[in-house]
Image: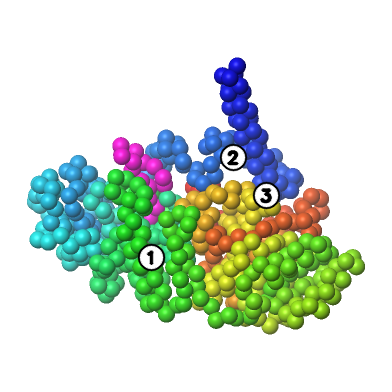
Amino acid sequence: MKKRSFVYRVFISKIEKVLYLIKKSLYFAWYRHHFLIPPKVLKKYIKSFFVVLKRGGNTSNLFTNQKAYNKWFLEQKGINDYKKFKYNPLISVIIPTYNVSRELLSECIDSVLNQSYTNFEICIADDNSSLQETIDTLKDYESNPKIKIEYRKNNGMISEASNTAIKLAKGEFIALLDNDDLLEKDALYYVVEALNKDKTIDMIYTDEDKLDFKGNKMEPHFKPDYSPDTLMSVNYICHLCVLRKSIVDRLGGFRKEFDGSQDYDLFLRFTELTSNIYHIPHILYHWRQTKNSTAGYLGNKSYAYIAGKKALEDALKRRNIKGKVLENPRVSTYLVKYGNDNPLISIIIPIKDKAKMTKRCIDSLYNKNIYKNFEIILVDNNSCEQETFDMIDEYKKNYDNFRSIRLECEFNYSYINNEAVKHAKGDYLLFLNNDTEVLDNDVLEYMVGYASQSHVGCVGIKLLYPDKLVQHAGVVLGYGGVAGHIYVTASKEDNGLFGRLCMPYNYTAVTAACLMIKKSKFDAVEGFDENLKVALNDVDLNLKVLSKGYFNVCLSNITMLHYESKSRGYEATNEKHNRFISEQKYMKKKWGKTLDNDKYFSKNNF
C-alpha cells in the first residue's frame, strides 16, 4: 500500500509539473499576443513548450543537455571556401605552462599548429615546472620553427609567466591560451577575417564552451557584443581573446598582484584605452574543466574571486568614479553600486483612474525607498472618478514634491510622457507605470548611479508579477516579434543564463514601465516617437539612445512588482490588435535590418 501511495504521489507531481509548464507557456503567449495568436506563432509556442518540458522546466540554457549541445555543435557548418586575405598579420599565441600533463599540453599546442590560418607563432613560457613530463613535452616541440619556448628559472605565477611569453612575441596581435585548453581549427581565420573588414580593431573575443573531465563539450557561452556594464559584473569576455600587442605593451602586460583574475584586470585596463572591440559569434575556444580550474567552479580558486573584486575596485579608482564593489549573494560575480551627487529625479506616472493601484505605487515611493530627492509628476489622462481626484488633492496637500497635470486627449503613451517631461525639474527622468510597487528600498539609488555614468543611456530593473515570476529582465530584438521581454515567467529564484537574472547586464532595450534616463540624453534623441501610441515606443527610445553611442542596462539585482496592464487592460480586441500590428510595421520600416540581430543576446540562447 505504501509503495502504491508513493508511485501515486510521484505520478501526481509529474502531472502537476506538466500543467505548470502548460500554464507557463500560455501565460507567455498571452503576454506576447493577448490570445490573438496567429497559427504559425501558436505552433511555435507549442513546440517551445515541449522543448522546455524535455529540459525539466529549466529556462536558463537551451543546451543544459550535453548530448543535445554536442549534436548541435557537430551540425554547425564549417568554412568550405577559405579566402585569401590582403592583410595577414602575425598572431602570437601566448601559452604560459606549469606542471601540465603531456596529453593535455600536446592537445593544446596541436590545436594551434593545426590552424587553418598559418601566419602565427606560439610563444611558450614555462613557469619552472617541477613535473618532468611537462618539460619533456615542451622539448619535443622545440624543433618546430613556429614555436618559441623560454624556461623560467623561478616560479613567478601566471602573470609573470604570461609576460615572459609576451616578450617572446613578434606578432601585431597576441592571442591568450591556457596550457590545457583547445582552439577550434578556424579560430585564427575568423580573427583575421574580422581584421580584414576593419583594421582598426584592437580587441577581438569569441564565444566559448567547456570540456568536461572526459573531454565532452558542454555549457556553451554565446556572448553579447561589447558590454561594459556586464564586464563590470563578470569577466564575460574570457576566452578566446586576441589583443593588439602595442596596447598590451603600453599597459605593461599583466599585473602580478591580480593573479587569478589577471586577464580580467587586463581587459578592464585595455578597454579604457580603446573602443575598437569586436565580438565573433562563434564558439572557437574550448575551456577545459579540471579539478583545479575556474572552468569547473569559481570557488575552486577563491583567490581568483578576491583578485577580481580588487581589479574592479582599482578600475573605479583609476577612472575616478565613486562606487562600491559588492559580492553578489546569488552567483560568483560582482555588483557595482555607483555613488551619486543626490540629483533631483523627476518620476513621471501616467494614469487613468485606478486610484487604489496608483496610491499603492506612490506610497511605496514615499515610504519604501531611501532616496528622497525626487519629485512626482502624475499625468492624468481623462480620469473621471471622484476617488482619483480626491487622491490627487490629498497628495498635493501632503507633499511639496508632488504635482499633477491633466491631459484631455486620446491615449498616446509617447505624447503623454513627452508633455510631462516639459514640466520636469529634475536632471534625471524615471518613467514609471502606476501598476508598479517598490520592493528594494535602494532602487532609485542603484538606478541613478548607473544613469549618471557617461556611457549609460536607459536604465531598467527586474520587474516581477505579483506571484513573483519575472515580468521583465531585459528586452531582446526579434523575440516574439519586433522585440520581447526575455525570461518572462521565470522563477524569482532563477539566476538566468550566466547570471542574467541576478546582476546588471547590457541589453538592447529595457521596458518603460520602469525606465530611468538622464534628461539631457532623452532630449538629445527627441524623446518618445509619438507615432508609436501604445506599443514599442520604449524599444524605439532605447534604439535611438543606442544609435547615439550609449549603452542600455538592466539591473536584474534590483526588483519592483509590476501588476502589468491592469490600468488599461490587455490588447484583447481586434482594433487594439490591428494597432499593435500597425506599430510593428512602423518599427520595421523605421529600423529595418537593425531589428534582425540583437547584439546583446544571441539567438542561440532562445
Q: Residues within 10 Å of mark 1 (few under 14, many from 20)?
A: many
The image's mark for residue 574 is: none
Percent of width and height locating residue 204: 36, 61
Residue 448, compared with residue 235, is above or below; it is below
273 magenta-colored: no
Residue 478 is situated, as x and y percent measured from the top left of the image, at: 59, 53
Q: Amino acid at mark 2?
A: Ser
Res 473 → quadrant: bottom right
Point 63% across, 58% down: residue = 463
Q: For the residue marked with disc 1, what is the amino acid?
A: Lys
Image coords of residue 97 (percent x, y): 19, 54
Q: Residues within 10 Å of mark 2 (few under 14, many from 20)?
A: some
Residue 50 shows up from this direction: yes
Left-right relation of 347 to 260: right
Which segment did they paint magenta?
Answer: 203-220
Which callout, 2 or 1, points at the residue further toward the start of the chain?
Answer: 2
Element marked by disc 3:
loop
Q: CA distance from mark 3 to mark 1?
A: 34 Å
Circles 3 and 1 in contact, beta carbons < 8 Å: no
First in sequence: mark 3 vs mark 2: 2
Return the mark for residue 309: 1
Q: CA distance from mark 3 to mark 2?
A: 23 Å
Mainly helix, strand or loop, the magenta region?
A: strand
Q: Is residue 203 visible?
A: no
Report the amino acid beneath label 3. Answer: Asp
Instruction: From the top left corner, tell me how far across and down residue 395 is, in percent.
Output: 79, 74
Magenta residue check for 206: yes
Q: CA distance from mark 2 to mark 1?
A: 39 Å
Left or right placement of residue 336 versus residue 485 in this view: left
